[in-house]
Amino acid sequence: MNEGSFRRPERTPQLAVHDFDISKLRASERNLFQLSESVRMKRVYGGCKNIVPDMVGVVGVMNSLTFLSLEHCQEIEYIFDATSVFGVDLLVPKFAELHLKSLENLKELCRGSPLQVLHFFEKISILVISKCWQLKNLFPPECQLRNLTRLIIKDFNGGQTLFSMSVAQSMELLEGLNVKSSHELKNIIGSEEDDRSNTDN
């Protein structure tokens, strides 16, 4: 391909896309996205401000996707835009591992009411976030991280508290937590009063 880099999966259903305008995908390339279990994107652009529904709308339903890595994708502002009508289970039904690195304009994992994407938070097992300086409100207080086993956060300015009390109580499978260079962070877990305040608001 003349523009960017698009590496086809070889023995395993993995895909790596670098320096590419995703709005110009051909049908055969969409098929690669839809069949891949692991997708890595670096410096991908093309008008998508979120993964669901914008990018999935371009690529198509990714039934096999379990791993997604985004790096230096400057247009991404949210992972999920819950202000749009969509069924996340139909779009990314197996999604379990998410790596976010150097996404300078990422504001939140979920925009709007998280009710439509709570199943995503329940499914995710590994989450790695690094150098996403604008990211706030990491986990909505309504979410349940029942399958989260590993969380790595580096160079993060997301506030004084990492988890609400209710979110922390849901993490029964958590095996590893690594937080580094989070200068605003004062408490890993918020108080029950904070939970009640969030519910009242």
Image: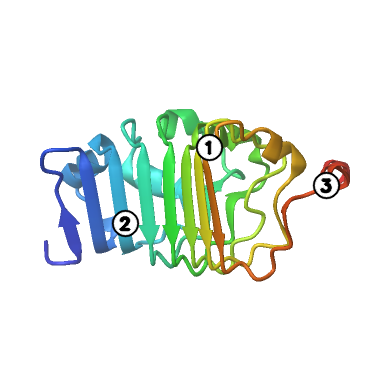
Mark 1 is on which residue type? Leu
Residue 30 in the image: state x and y as whole percent.
24, 43
Q: Pointer 3: residues within 10 angstroms few (<14), some, or many (20+)?
A: some
- Classify mark 1: helix, strand or loop: loop
Which mark, residue 184? none
Q: Is residue 7 above or below residue 104?
A: above
Earlier in the chain: of badge 3 and badge 1, it is 1
Please tell me which of labels 2 and 3 falls first in the chain: 2
Q: Which residue is mark 1?
A: 148
Depth check, front residue: 13 or 194: 194
- Between marks 2 and 1, how big is the CA–CA gap? 23 Å
Left or right of 121? Residue 168 is right
Q: Which residue is mark 2?
A: 41
Name the residue rendered at 43%, 37% in the picture: 96
Asked if one can make out residue 197 in the rendered structure from this viewpoint, the answer is: yes
Tell me the residue that label 3 is attached to: 191
Question: Could you tell me residue 180's position as x and y percent?
Answer: 55, 64
Give the mark toward the camera: 2 or 1. 1
In which quadrant of the rendered image does the N terminus lie? Answer: bottom left
Q: Alpha carbon of mark 3 to alpha carbon of mark 1: how far?
A: 21 Å
Gap in angstroms between the C-alphas marked 2 and 3: 37 Å
